[in-house]
Image (cartoon, grey):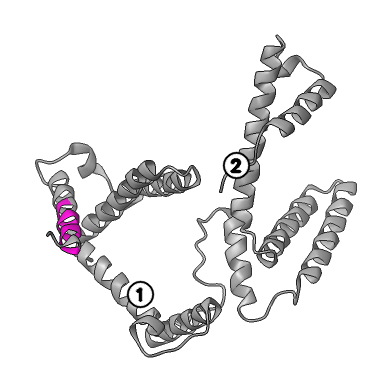
C-alpha cells in the first residue's frame, strides 16, 4: 500500500519541477516576465477566491482554489531562489519548525487548560522569539496594513485587548457605541465632513469590539449582510420585471414594497 505522506511529498516535488520548467530559459514567456511586484495582485485574488469557495460550501472549487494559491506561493519562492535568498524548502522547513516551537503542549511537556491558554502561550513564545532576534515588537505590530480596514481594526483591537486595553464587559462596549453614534450625529449636524469621517471611523472600530464581545466575526457578519442585501435586491429586480417595470422608474414606496416582499422570500445565506 502506498505511503500517503510520501505520495504528498512526491506531488509537491512535481509542482516545484513544473514551476522550475515554466521559469526556465525555454519556459513560458509570461511566467518569466513576472516579478514579486507583479504577482502581488494575483496572490490577493487567489486568497479571496479560496474564501469564496469556503463560503459557498464548494469542496471541489475549494480544492482547485487552494491549488491556485499554493502555486502562487511556489512561484514567489522560486523567484527568491533565483535571487539566492531562499527556496521553497526553506519556507516549508521554517513553518514546520515554528509550528512545533509554538505548540509545546503538543510536541513538548507543557500542559494547558484550553484554547485561551494556548493563545496566551503563543503570544509569549512569539515575543520571546523576537527578543532573541533583537527585534522586540510593540503590542500592535504584526497586523498587515494591506488588510481590509474592517479586518485590520478587528485585529488591532484584539491585540490591544491582550494587554488589558479593552472594555471590561459587553455593556461597556455597547455604551461606547451609543456615545460614538451621538458624536457622529453632532458631526453630521455641524456638516463637518472631516469630523463625520473621524466619528464614522470611531464607530466602526468600536463595532468590531462589540462583535468580539458577542463572539461574532465582524468581517464575516458584513459579508453575510452584503450577500443578504444582494439576494434581496436581485429579488426586487426580478419582481419588478415580472410586473413589467424596472427599478429606475419606480417610486421609493413601490421599491419598499418589493423589498419587504424580498425579505419574506429570501433566506439568510449559509455560513
Q: Is residue 10 magenta?
A: yes
Q: Is residue 241 above or below residue 94?
A: above
| Mark number, residue 223 | none
The residue located at (43%, 86%) in the rendering is 128
Disc 1 and disc 2: Cα gap in Å?
A: 34 Å
Q: Looking at the image, can residue 87 be seen?
A: no
For mark 1, what is the residue? 99
| Mark number, residue 269 | 2
Sequence-first disc among 1 and 2: 1
Q: Is residue 197 magenta?
A: no
Q: Quadrant of the N terminus?
A: bottom left
Q: Position of residue 24 (x, y in %)?
A: 12, 47
| In the displayed structure image, the side of residue 6 where residue 254 appears, left or right | right
Q: Looking at the image, can residue 117 be seen?
A: yes
Q: Residues within 10 Å of mark 1 (few under 14, many from 20)?
A: few
Point out the frontmost of discs 1 and 2. 2
Q: Position of residue 197 (x, y in %)?
A: 74, 51
Is label 2 in a helix, a strand or a loop?
Answer: loop
The residue located at (22%, 62%) in the rendering is 88
Magenta stretch? 5-14
| In the displayed structure image, the side of residue 115 where residue 196 appears, left or right | right
| In the displayed structure image, the side of residue 203 where residue 208 appears, left or right | left
Amino acid at each position: 500500500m502506498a505511503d500517503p505522506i510520501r505520495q504528498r511529498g512526491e506531488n509537491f516535488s512535481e509542482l516545484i519541477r513544473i514551476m522550475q520548467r515554466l521559469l526556465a530559459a525555454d519556459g513560458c514567456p509570461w511566467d518569466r516576465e513576472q516579478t514579486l511586484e507583479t504577482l502581488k495582485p494575483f496572490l490577493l485574488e487567489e486568497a479571496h477566491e479560496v474564501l469564496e469557495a469556503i463560503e459557498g460550501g464548494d469542496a471541489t472549487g475549494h480544492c482547485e482554489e487552494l491549488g491556485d494559491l499554493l502555486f502562487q506561493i511556489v512561484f514567489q519562492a522560486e523567484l527568491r531562489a533565483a535571487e539566492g535568498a531562499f527556496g521553497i524548502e526553506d519556507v516549508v522547513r521554517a513553518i514546520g519548525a515554528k509550528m512545533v516551537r509554538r505548540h509545546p503542549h503538543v510536541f513538548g511537556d507543557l500542559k494547558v487548560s484550553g484554547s485561551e491558554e494556548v493563545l496566551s502561550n503563543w503570544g509569549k513564545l512569539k515575543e520571546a522569539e523576537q527578543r532573541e532576534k533583537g527585534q522586540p515588537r510593540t503590542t500592535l505590530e504584526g497586523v498587515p496594513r494591506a488588510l481590509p480596514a474592517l479586518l485590520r481594526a478587528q485585529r488591532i483591537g484584539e491585540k490591544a485587548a491582550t494587554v488589558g486595553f479593552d472594555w471590561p464587559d459587553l455593556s461597556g462596549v455597547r455604551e461606547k457605541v451609543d456615545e460614538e453614534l451621538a458624536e457622529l450625529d453632532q458631526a453630521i449636524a455641524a456638516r463637518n465632513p472631516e469630523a463625520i469621517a473621524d466619528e464614522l471611523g470611531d464607530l466602526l472600530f468600536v463595532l468590531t469590539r462589540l462583535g468580539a464581545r458577542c463572539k461574532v466575526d465582524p468581517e464575516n457578519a458584513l459579508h453575510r449582510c452584503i450577500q443578504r442585501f444582494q439576494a434581496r435586491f436581485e429579488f426586487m429586480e426580478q419582481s419588478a420585471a415580472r410586473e413589467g417595470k424596472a427599478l429606475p422608474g419606480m417610486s421609493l414606496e413601490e421599491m419598499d414594497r418589493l423589498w419587504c416582499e424580498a425579505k419574506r422570500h429570501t433566506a439568510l445565506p449559509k455560513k
